[in-house]
Amino acid sequence: MQQRPTAAPRRAVVTGSAGFIGSHLAHTLGQAGTTVVGVDRRDPSTDATAAANLAVLHGLSGYHHVVADLVTCAIDPLLIDADVVFHLAGVPGVRTSWGRQFSDYLASNVLATHRLLEACTRIGIPRLVVASSSSVYGPTDGGASLESDLPRPASPYAVTKLAQEQLCLAWAARPRSPRVVALRYFTVYGPRQRADMFTHRALQTALSGQPLRLYGDGQQRRDFTYIGDAVAATIAAAVVPTACGVINVGGGSNASLLEVIDIATTIVGRDIHIEHDHARGGEPFRVR
């Protein structure tokens, strides 16, 4: 069950509201009585994933959905009277960031964020919570990543996420700009998770009997964070008066990909046939 926040803002804007974390965040805020303006460039009338993610919000009083691209749309009207902006919109994923889609990563993760920061400053938004990623840390030795660690992004995606959070923090140092909290999420999982994420793929292949493609030897360790915990941390970042800067959001324990496969086989009761492939560039070997 998703956790309910002990406190919630009066009115909030959630960008990327048709996504995995964004839809959960918007739903939790709406249940807590927050008026939510959800913004996403994906149109639920034509995008099946967006429609499925937003289905839980149908009939929820106080939720208003806007189909708009932050790269080109008029942002100011979306922000009027908001106490906080949760900026979760962006292009995720490591593998495709190496190719021709990088321009979309740059536009959606960096340029759109700059436009949003300009609008937040004009409107006078007091708090901006931006979704970053543990990917900014790059490869680690297996120990816990600390906010004070030097980032070493190892993929174009991670570079854009680091640029995004640092751009927000640079704006926060300027007069009349919003206070900024950048949340470095560690592998969030749960209902409505993206189909390309490993926990989803492991469970899906166990259910279907199809082979699971495993990149590398499976010894990579990650800190898996349940969606309810990620949402609770995100809302806390908006309402805790002293919150500012970069904060890690993780589950506090880690598991290897092989251990995730074992859990999936136990839950489903069917063995998974693994197809081994070379490790993909830019994915950290050991992450906590």
Image: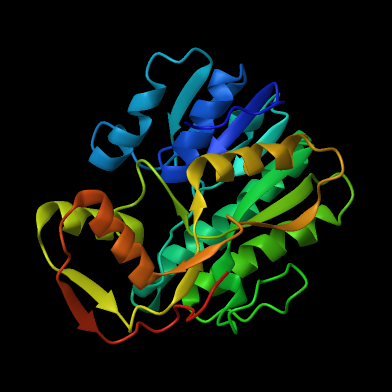
User: At 64% from the left edge and 50% from the top edge, which residue is drawn?
Assistant: 130
Instruction: Reply above or below: 215 against 12.
Output: below
Dividing the picture into quarters, in which one does residue 113 lie? bottom right
User: At 47% from the left edge and 35% from the top edge, which residue is drawn?
Assistant: 24
User: At 30% from the left edge and 79% from the top edge, which residue is drawn?
Assistant: 215
Q: Position of residue 241 (x, y in %)?
A: 85, 38
Residue that protrudes farthest toward the right in the picture: 175
Residue that protrudes farthest toward the left in the picture: 209
User: At 49% from the left edge and 40% from the top edge, which residue is drawn?
Assistant: 22
Q: Position of residue 265 (x, y in %)?
A: 23, 58
Colour scheme employed for the rendering of this structure: rainbow
**Quadrant location of the C terminus in the rendered image:** bottom right
Dividing the picture into quarters, in which one does residue 77 lie? top right
Instruction: Reply above or below: 50 against 255.
Output: above
Q: Position of residue 79 (x, y in %)?
A: 64, 31
Q: Is residue 138 left or right of residue 100?
A: right
Q: Is residue 121 left or right of residue 3?
A: right
**133 vs 204, nearest the viewer:** 204
**267 vs 29, nearest the viewer:** 267
Q: Is residue 136 left or right of residue 103?
A: right
Q: Is residue 96 left or right of residue 143?
A: left
User: Is residue 112 visible from the viewing direction of this image?
Assistant: yes
Figure disc tally? 0
User: Is residue 101 visible from the viewing direction of this image?
Assistant: no
